[in-house]
Amino acid sequence: QEVTLKLHQFLPAQANVPKLVLDVWADNVEEDSGGRIKVERYPSMQLGGKPPELIDQAIDGVADIVWTVVGYTPGRFPSTEVFELPFMMTNARAVSHAYWEMFEKHMKDTEFKDVKILGTWVHGPGIFHTKDPVEAPEDLQGMKIRGGSRSVNSLLTKLGATPVGMPVPAVSEGLSKGVIDGTTIPWEVTTALKVPELVENHTEFEGRALYVLTFVLAMNKDKYDSLPDDLKKVIDDNSGLEFSVFAGGTQADSDGPAREVALDLGNNIITISEADTAAWREIAQPIYDEWIADMDSKGIDGQALIDEANMLIEKYTPQYEN
Amino acid sequence: MTALEIGIASFPALMALIFLRVPIGLAMFLVGLVGLILVTDGTTVAFARLKTETFTTFSSYSLSIVPMFLLMGHFATLGGMSTALFKAAEGWLGHRRGGVAMASIGACAGFGAICGSSLATAATMGRVALPELKQYGYAGGFSTATLAAGGTLGILIPPSVVLVIYAILTEQNIAKLFLAAFIPGILAAIGYVIAISIYVRLYPDSAGVRPPVPYAERFAALLRVWPVLLVFGLVVGGIYLGWFTPTEGAAVGAFGTGFIAWLNGGLNRETLIDSFLVTARSTAMIFFIVLGAAFYNGFLALTQVPQQLSDFVVSQGFSPWVVLILILCFYLVFGCLMDSLSMILLTIPIFFPVISAMDFGLVDLAAMQADLAREVLAVGVPEGMGAEMLASIQEAIATGLELTREQMRALDIRMTQGMANRIEAEMVAIWFGILVLIVVEVGLITPPVGMNLFIINAMDRKTPMVETYKAVIFFVASDIFRVILLVAFPAITLFLLPG
Amino acid sequence: MHKAMMGLARFLAIVGGIVLSALIILTCVSILGRLLNGGLHSDLIEGLAPGMAKWLLDLGVGPVNGDFELVEAGVAFAIFCFLPLCQITAGHASVDILANSFPKSVNRFLRMVIEIAFALVLCLIAWRLLEGTMDKFGNGETTLLLEFPIWWAFALSFCAALAAAVVGVYMAGVRTYEFITGRILIWDGVEATQ
Ligand code: NA
Ligand code: NA
């Protein structure tokens, strides 16, 4: 083959995203290039460094392609946070679609100008997994919860819970030792963390979800530019809007089997109806205001981003409902 | 040269540098750097990685446990805990044949419960016990060998810095590893005491006699070890009660010992600065090795060597037990030459994938389900369970069949194949970790290169190294016997673990 | 010269030790806050002294926000601070097995080469860390909870790394002088046993 691309990411090779999204992407690229591109896959941070360094590894060419959580480097890609606000997200395909459109319009030549973005997506709805049931905001009073993102932590404080900072791999230990009473994560990762074995209650929200994290698949710019035109086309054809929707959708589809595991164990799944989320949203409102103020201080029109994201999410959500 | 060839060639290069006395961390860093430059055709990748990798390697929440445990050990000495432990053990054991040596082992075990490092335990107890051993006519080599071996209890008995590093490398639960290390650690202490009694029987002239101490004094000495029990209880108890995580436990332990040392008047400005300096030196030494290993392992992954090795071993279809024994023998041999931390950092990323890809059959799904089912049925047949269902469950238990989902639902128990696989994977990781811990610790006392031997021997200039080498064989033999025992009976290591 | 270098190394080690102690205390305070917070929310206390429980909770009794981030930033700085002392006291772990059988002159030569290589590596580390600091300064990256700029921690660590590089270069000079003159200025393991 002519070109070797090193794909670096933080999860083990057999986890859902590497297996069902990244491998599929890499296999397609290899095949479409007629074997001229080889994608070497390095899971579990094998090329060194910690997950927050991934985006710089793509910018500096330590790896050619990386998959990373945008929130690992807070403050660097602030516009993406619009999708991470509480009760923004509906379903992963629609939001990934909106994310890609807004990326092309607002972020491509600004926040992400140092790297070639191949895909932008979000995971399935982030939900509560707790020892004691959470049916209303006041149930969280006094619980120690690991929050999945900055805005979730902020929401937890407002709900009277104590947000506890700990890395994802520490969650199982934290739950089993009682250092935390619950955690927020999407269904998909609960299996690997043994969450359904450690807690008995899961709280989902109908309609808009509690939170999500945003991802990017990013390529080193020079590496991309160095490719001959026909190979550039192979990369382009496999990337962009369609791939982003596929990635977000595939990741969210892994939620189902994980939820099944919890049901099998006889766990209690609580669904908060759309009407009942009103009380939650009211508590979350100040987080929106704080975020808009924060964006203003960075010279970004936060309100406009929120409005546009809302508009796009509402537009695409019906399109992707099963 | 292909990347794979460069990766393979890096082993002899690394060994050559290490034997030319290049510091181990530096050697790994240099080979990783040069290898990375060769594999990636230039300095771009290596230099880009260095922009953040030194910082992020040092900036690790879980590794912050290391300097905290080291500081804790120094504070414990300042607080008089090492002396108190030795005096108490000596009061009860000292008058027996070889009793002062046995007391040294007992004190090392006690100190190991509040100190995370072998070298620190050896050095601390050496300072306390060597003069006494001398005074009661114990032979030089026998005394130094006893203390060098006793020092390894610093790591074998939790808390343990090497176990923390292993837990981080293999993403395992530190608290469970500590728990699993407990019985093997106690067995180590017992094994050393037996080694001593055999030694003094074979060489009666090597140990003098110490007059017995009155019982009142013995009890008084025993009472003076309360701070050790308090700190150990607080740290270990707090971790298991969910008051704090192991990382936070290290901070609690350091604070607690520091506070006790201050109460006892052992901690003042001068001794505090002194403990900072000693902690600084060993912390920097450890973290430079961690950095070198991170850099070298990043390069090695790029050459695909660990992947290929794991694939090769698995495809050969060796029995898991043969592979395990070969790996342990490798550690025993290399332990004669290298220090434990470097070996763990260098080899676990290569060996762990091999071991975790194998099935040791430590877990039996049907048996676990049957245990859970029996527990439920012992309380009484659950409400709403039909006679037919009950009969089918009882039949499954009797014949050793796995339960169906419906049967588990009816019993309200949770134990699926997936859960069993995860339990097996975790048990193998923990058991392997304890075995590796022991064999690399044996390396600290095997001639010719054994860090503990050097440390203790340096305190006793009158004893030739060869004398120490001769006596330490007895302790090494007890170590090897223990390893065989733990390999043959995984349950010794695993039975304390919560289901 | 040696006095100044030793003074620098000791000073930084003590600074690192103080930072480490501060992190230990911070962690303990955070644990205490978390435990108290849990206790105040417990049914027992809320039943016995609801007013006081609420007052204390409103006061912000709970874990220290961002304790985890402060430990990560602080411990990195402390370890960089510890490097110079390890360098100047020849504290790095090495394998002496063959070196013991080499003639003294060979050992002196090896030690010079090794110390020069070490100095180069420490300079490389400091230089790259400076680049890293500039990157973080330029891109506005912050920590997750406290949102303090990451470059602060990088910049502090760079200062300590620079000191380590200076001490490394000094030690390379010392070993070169020892090799040329045959006079040992700073003793380490092998010379002691030979
Ligand atoms: Na210990
Ligand atoms: Na050895």
Image (cartoon, coloured by chain):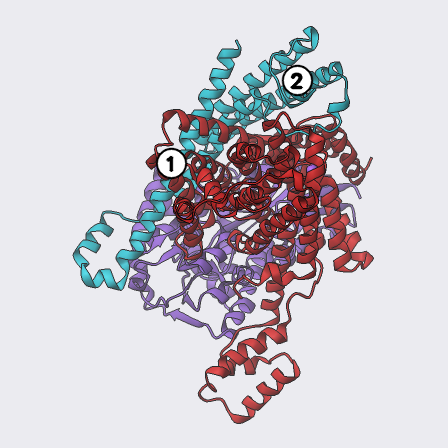
Chain colours: A purple, B red, C cyan
- Residue B178 place in picture, x, y as percent: 53, 52
Asked whether C36 or B303 is in front, the reply is C36
- Residue C52 place in picture, x, y as percent: 18, 54
Q: Which mark is residue A208?
A: none
Q: Residues within 10 Å of mark 2 (few under 14, many from 20)?
A: many
Q: Is mark 2 within 8 Å of ligand 2?
A: no
- Residue A181 place in picture, x, y as percent: 39, 60
Q: Is mark 1 within 8 Å of ligand 1?
A: no
Q: Badge 2 sits on which subunit? A: C
Q: Hey, which quadrant is residue C128 in on the image?
A: top right
Give the number of the mark in front: 1 or 2.
1
Q: Secondary structure at mark 1?
A: helix
At label 2, the amino acid type is Ile
Residue bearing mark 1:
B261
Q: Badge 1 sits on which subunit? A: B
At label 1, the amino acid type is Ala
Q: Residues within 10 Å of mark 1 (few under 14, many from 20)?
A: many
Q: Residue furthest left?
A: C51
Q: Residue furthest top?
A: C181
Q: Is residue B265 visible?
A: yes
Residue in the image at 33% along x and 48% along y: C32
Eyeballing the image, is A74 above or below C134? below
Asked whether C133 or C170 is in front, the reply is C170
Asked whether A86 or C177 is in front, the reply is C177
Eyeballing the image, is A16 above or below A268? above
Residue bearing mark 2:
C116
**Gap in angstroms between the C-alphas marked 1 and 2:** 41 Å
